[in-house]
Image (cartoon, rainbow, N blue to C red):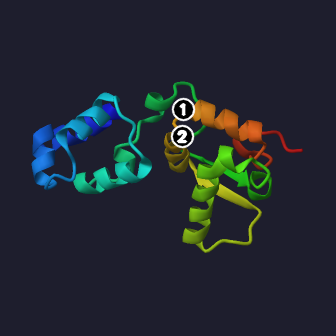
Amino acid sequence: MGTRLRAVRSQQRLSLHGVERKSGGKWKAVVVGSYERGDRAVSVARLAELAEFYGVPISELLPTEEGVATGSRADTSGKIVLDLQKLQNVPAEDAAPLVRYAQSIQRQRGDYGNKVLSIRGEDLRALALMFDTSLDRLTEKLVGWGVLAPGSMGQVPD
């Protein structure tokens, strides 16, 4: 992701200190530089703010599928289907980011009554960042938790 951050900054012909000046000090050169080098983790919220500052969609700052995991079983161009009832059985400390994300999507869609929720590939990449993991490992977590609806991502129906 750091490479993507650096590329966007460079395309805008900004130095690290230029970012700090242009942002009025909101984005410190040392912090942005550490994000770019991968020395410091960036939260999804801060990444969204940085994307807004650069005037680009957040997806431009997210790693490509190859950058997150090569040979990933997760199809980031498609979608998966979460079984929301099974998600309730996963310990909160394990799945809290996924639960919050699913609830957010439900609010946006005004869709509260369904037992399943379709998640786009782009959302999977964001979730992988929230869990600080690769798409492969996120997929393994979802399979391990048993929250994928039958037929989702190659799962065999019960």
Q: Quadrant of residue 157?
A: top right
Q: Residues within 10 Å of mark 2 (few under 14, many from 20)?
A: some
Q: Which residue is outermost to the bottom?
A: 110
Residue at horizontal 31 percent and vertical 36 percent from the top: 35
Compared with residue 51, is residue 66 higher up or lower down, i.e. above or below?
Answer: above
Q: Is residue 120 left or right of residue 154?
A: left
Contact? badges 2 and 1 (CB < 8 Å): yes
Classify the position of the N terminus by image quarter.
top left
Q: Quadrant of residue 135?
A: top right
**Closer to us: 82 or 21:** 21
At x 18%, y 40%, the residue is 29
Question: In which quadrant is the C terminus drawn?
Answer: top right
Judging by the rendered image, the residue that carries numbered circle 2 is 128
Residue 102, position as x, y percentages in the image: 62, 58
Q: Is residue 40 above or below residue 106?
A: above
Task: Give the x, y percent position of residue 153.
Answer: 69, 41
Q: Is residue 100 above or below residue 122?
A: below
How would you rate the neighbour count of disc 1 (Cα within 10 Å): few for under 14, some for 14-19, many for 20 or more? many
Q: Nearer the viewer, residue 133 or 117?
A: 133
Q: Is residue 124 left or right of residue 144?
A: left
Residue 27 in the image, given as x and y percentages of width and height:
22, 48
Residue at 74 percent of width and 38 percent of height: 143
Label placed on residue 134: 1
The kind of residue tagged 1 is Ser
Check disc 2 and give the amino acid type. Answer: Ala
Foreground pick, 92 / 116: 92
Residue 143 visible in the shown view: yes
Mark 1 residue element: loop
